[in-house]
Image (tube, grey):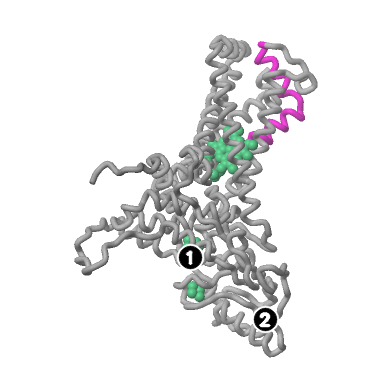
Amino acid sequence: MNLTLHVWRQKDVATPGQMVRYDAPNVSEHMSFLEMLDVVNEGLILKGDEPIAFEHDCREGICGSCGFMINGIAHGGFKNTTVCQLHMRHFEDGDEVFIEPWRATAFPVMKDLIVDRSAFDRIIASGGYVSVSTGSAPDGNALPIRKQDSDLAMDAAACIGCGACVASCPNAAAALFTGAKISHLAHLPQGQPERKERSLRMVRQMNAELFGNCTNIGECEATCPKGIPIEVIASMNGDFLAASWQERPPVEIAGAG
Amino acid sequence: MASAALDSKLHRTLRFYEATNGKKTVMALTGAALWGFVIIHLLGNLQVFLGPDKLDKYGEALRATGALLWVARGGLLLCVVLHITAALQLMALKAKARPQPYVKKVATTSTYASRTMYWSGPVILGFIIFHLMHFTWGVPGIHPDFVDGAVHANLVKGLSQPLAAVLYLTAMSMLLFHLYHGIWSMFQTMGLSHPRYTPLVKKAAAGIAIALAGGNIAIVVSVLLGIVK
Ligand code: HEM
Ligand code: SF4
Ligand code: FES
């Protein structure tokens, strides 16, 4: 099949970009979307042009490196599918395909389709950790975890940090991502000691990165390649409320000991 | 990027409000109070169907509560001010969070109501101001023939103006959307979500929003059709 691509080209973070039209001839329906771009890029390189820059690593939907908007929908809008797992059989001969990077102040465009997502790393660093004792390995079954909680924690932990939720959100909010990270640890016994501070720190870091405010629109859930439900956002909201209620000024001298 | 200080010196209430989650909570609580007002306001107005003197007596009874009425008015005004202040701040953040729009962006599963909260809200605010000028203060030029205390007659005369009736109908449709998304969103904001009950909450929110807007619309339409005279 033959496609017409409209791709966002941008030299670097400081230079404004624009949409550029490319022909993608002889696309095989067996290719993945990224393989289709690889072929287009080979053509560009042969012509002496700069290839289209995009992020990718595992190409099996698990690392979270890839992702951009296809025809106005993050990852192209196929259920639980990253762009690396999106196959060209979903397209038809003659289709026009618009390809754009995620757009958010917190995700500056570095080049073409690549955005800087280190804001996500800083959100995780602000509270997405647990305290563990070092030393001898703990007994594997010493810490009982309710089945339902372990399931919910694992579901939330499926988030690969791709950023599609921010990209899809009309508010450019990072509530689904942050909610997934908070909810993941909130369901585990290991996550309890830091649970209160975690929600306060991560929400405030999310605000400091200039992500927008969630108004429960739900586009994030619909385009998340890992099917993270917005229930995790409610869970984050609940934790933040409880933690804010209980937050108190630090005391100079601790009572005990 | 600045990292968020956990131990700033702000008062804890201010620190709570400083976060987007704090503003959302204020919107949810004030929104809930305003929703309560819409219910009571409609129940009061539906007495228009019970005969001409019912509404006048109801108006009299409300005024007779004296100080209590002013407390309620003050509380509602406070809710409106808090709700709108938070909305404006969050709207400004929205503009800052994505200054460059997409060349192409398609909405997938989200509702029209959810995407237009920052539109339906201001429409309702504009309507509230018009509504007060129309039926509470009876501003000449806005209301054709306002007589203090003649609630029923004021309502019938006021709604018989076609332009005013259209304004009421438009505002009520926007209220329907705002309340539909607002009511279920409130639960989510307060941390209440459950795979079994949230779909029911959404259905109930739709039903309640339709009933509230529909009740008000029924009054306007009944006056236009001459059922209420
Ligand atoms: C200028 C006026 C207004 C603006 C800009 C506005 C805007 C908003 C916005 C942006 C939300 C948040 C939606 C979300 O988080 O999902 C909201 C929620 C809500 N609004 Fe308004 N609104 C306005 C007036 C009103 C009025 C007059 C009422 C009462 C009839 C009302 C009732 C509600 C309710 C019940 C909610 C739910 C709270 C929540 O979502 O957590 N709003 N409004
Ligand atoms: S919540 Fe989903 S869409 Fe958002 S970063 Fe994680 S995997 Fe990607
Ligand atoms: S390249 Fe790893 S998820 Fe797509």
| Chain of the residue on which disc 2 is drawn | A
Q: From which residue to which does the magenta span run?
A: B149-175
Give the image quarter of residue B166: top right
Q: Residue at x 56, y 9 (%)?
A: B64
Q: Residue at x 63, y 60 (%)?
A: B106
For this view, does A166 lie left or right of residue A112? Answer: left
Q: Is residue B167 magenta?
A: yes
Q: Is residue B48 magenta?
A: no
Q: Report which residue position mark 2 lands on.
A: A24
Query: What whole-number distance in Å separates the C-alpha atoms at marks 1 and 2?
Result: 30 Å
Kind of residue sitting beneath label 1: Gly
Front in this rendered view, residue B54 or B122: B122
- The percent coordinates of residue A158 (x first, y second) are 41, 65
Front in this rendered view, residue B182 or A100: A100
Q: Residue at x 27, y 58 (%)?
A: A147
Q: Report which residue position mark 1 lands on.
A: A161
Determine the main secondary structure of the stretch shown in magenta.
helix
| Chain of the residue on which disc 1 is drawn | A
Does residue A50 appear anywhere in the picture?
Answer: yes
Q: Are marks 1 and 2 in contact (CB under 8 Å)?
A: no
Question: In the displayed structure, would residue A203 be above or below residue B22?
Answer: below
Question: In the displayed structure, would residue B66 be above or below residue A205?
Answer: above
- The percent coordinates of residue B62 (x first, y second) are 56, 14
The kind of secondary structure element at disc 2 is strand
For this view, does A193 lie left or right of residue B30? Answer: left
Ligand 2 within 8 Å of disc 1? The answer is yes
- The percent coordinates of residue B217 (x first, y second) are 63, 30
